[in-house]
Image (cartoon, rainbow, N blue to C red):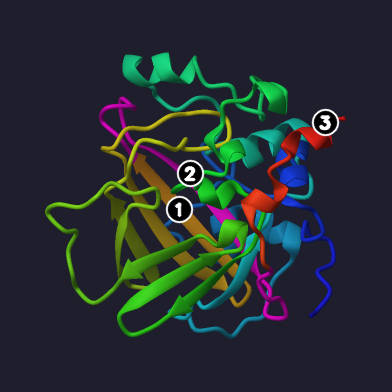
Amino acid sequence: MAKRANSLRGYSLALVLALELPCAALAQNRPGSANPQTKNPSAAIGGGVYSALGPGPANFDAHDLSGIWNMSFPQNATQAELEVYVSQFGKGDPPMTPWSKERFDKTKPAFGPRGVLVAQTNDPAFQCFPPGVPRIYLHPFPMQIVETPKELIMVFEYDHSVRHIYTDGRQHPPDFTPAYMGDSIGHWDGDTFVIDTVGFNDKTWLDRAGHPHSDRLHVTERLRRIAADRLQIDFTIEDPVAYARPFTSSMFFRGHPDWSLMEQVCEDNADFLSFEH
């Protein structure tokens, strides 16, 4: 197996969760943040993640998203900025309703400005529940994308979580059992792959900072391959019960064709307290 230099691959789940390692680049209302309509990759990221990583190879198929992708982050970001990036979607709190604010005040995350000791947290992830969508992207482990004629499959190294995004023209079922990962359908809009996900339960947090959501959560993801080894995902998060209006954010990933996914099981790392001693 190829070495994974400058990555987090050597850490166990518990250590990664405890250390708040800087792995994600989330841009919301930041100078140079991504514009989904921009065709120039360097302009889209505005000298942030893209320039920090350097330009990738020029030739690629924009409709081929397959491969293994890992989070990217700006190398010149401050520690405070990195702690925000790895904890939540965008800067500051999203536009919470009284319903979600009441629940948010009761959450005890292990990350961000409200972070508590692991022994005190009520984060479902520390009980090995699935993180759900979109939170799973904030966990610093790679994901593999596999495309077939009928679906796009996302396999996350984190606890071997899997998403099936159906592309065979089906619609969301009229009645479904609420799920951690929701029900996802996808289609191409030009060079952008659009994922529409509904059908969530309300047992997860949107992020690692403790922002809740209801079972009315609706997540739209727009995936765009902006270079041979660069992937951008733009999120629109809607939940009329929990948030007064939709809000958006973006993440960036780098391709690693020489990597393979490793086995990572939450229960094998369940003794999180040992990392605080």
Kindly identify which residue carries mark 1.
234
Instruction: Give 28 or 256, whichever is nearer the viewer.
Output: 256
Instruction: Give 10 or 265, whichever is nearer the viewer.
Output: 265
Q: Is 1 left, or right, of 23 in this rendering? A: right
Instruction: Please say if the residues under marks 1 and 2 sit with CB atoms less than 8 Å apart.
Output: yes
Determine which quarter of the picture holds residue 217: top left
Q: Is 76 left, or right, of 162 in this rendering? A: right
Kindly identify which residue carries mark 3.
276
Identify which amino acid the numbered label 2 is placed on: Ser
Determine which quarter of the picture holds residue 1: bottom right
Query: Considering the image in quadrants, where does the C terminus appear?
Result: top right
Boundaries of the magenta span: 238-262
Confirm whether the magenta stretch covers residue 254.
yes
Counting the numbered discs, the total is 3
Mark 2 vs 3, N-terminal side: 2
- Residue 249 disc label: 2
Q: Measured from the top left, where is residue 211 in percent x and y?
A: 47, 29
